[in-house]
Amino acid sequence: MKNALSRSLAIIVIIVISIIAGFVIDDICDSIDRKTHPRTYSEYVEKYSEMYGVPEEVIYATIRTESDFVSNAVSSAGAIGLMQIMPDTFKWLCEKNGESLEEGMLYDPETNIRYGTYYLSYLYSEFGLWETVYAAYNCGPGRVKEWQTSEEYADENGILIDIPFRETSDYVKKVSKAVTVYEKLYNKEIDQ
């Protein structure tokens, strides 16, 4: 009887320690993820998320994937700023928006987030699926539209089933994964 009680108590202690360890490990992982998935520039992200109807986690994930929150980043292709906007795309977006801004404004975090979010919104109105939007953001909407008409790359509804450019395919996966992490980390706070 005493041995059975000792065994039961030992099992209960092991279960309790395991549960506590699970919570501690989860908190440590969340802490690491918060450092690698910050919400820097939140005032601009919130403002333009609401203005253009783009989920905040999509904007943060795009910034993280594009520039890792470095506002003066410039890619080898010439994309500029937090959301890595090409100067020609910026000029086109400004014209669509009835504005005329200098290319140098792409280094300004608010301007870059505004126009990057505006572009995401535009692409979403064109494609209607975030994964397709990410592909178009990376390689251009014209190329994605070509893929959508090919049985090799898209299903009968135009949903991409294969992305022929590895860089774009990897990009879509990175942004999608970052969106999932942002949702997990920060939507917890809203739910609590």
Image: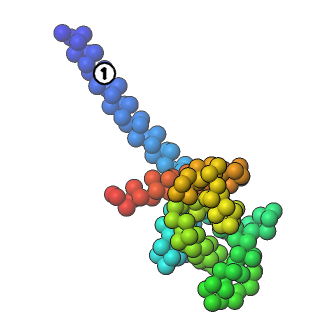
Quick check: 117 above or below 185? below
Q: Quadrant of residue 2?
A: top left
Number of marks: 1
Quarter of the image with the N terminus in it: top left
- Left or right of 92? Residue 156 is left
Q: Nearer the viewer, residue 134 or 42?
A: 134
Q: Of the residues shown, which amino acid type is indicated by label 1?
A: Ile
Q: Quadrant of residue 121?
A: bottom right
Quick check: 104 above or below 12? below
Quick check: 21 above or below 90? above
- Left or right of 123? Residue 55 is left
Quick check: 20 above or below 149? above
- Where does label 1 land, which residue? 11
Which residue is the extreme one toward the left? 1
Q: Nearer the viewer, residue 145 or 72?
A: 145
Q: Under tag 1, what secondary structure?
A: helix
How far from the left and from the top, in percent, is residue 11?
Answer: 30, 21
Q: Nearer the viewer, residue 73 or 175?
A: 175
- Left or right of 174? Residue 105 is right
Q: Residue at x 46, y 56 (%)?
A: 183
Q: Residue at x 33, y 57 (%)?
A: 192
Q: Residue at x 52, y 57 (%)?
A: 157
The image's colouring method is rainbow
Q: Residue at x 63, y 84 (%)?
A: 96
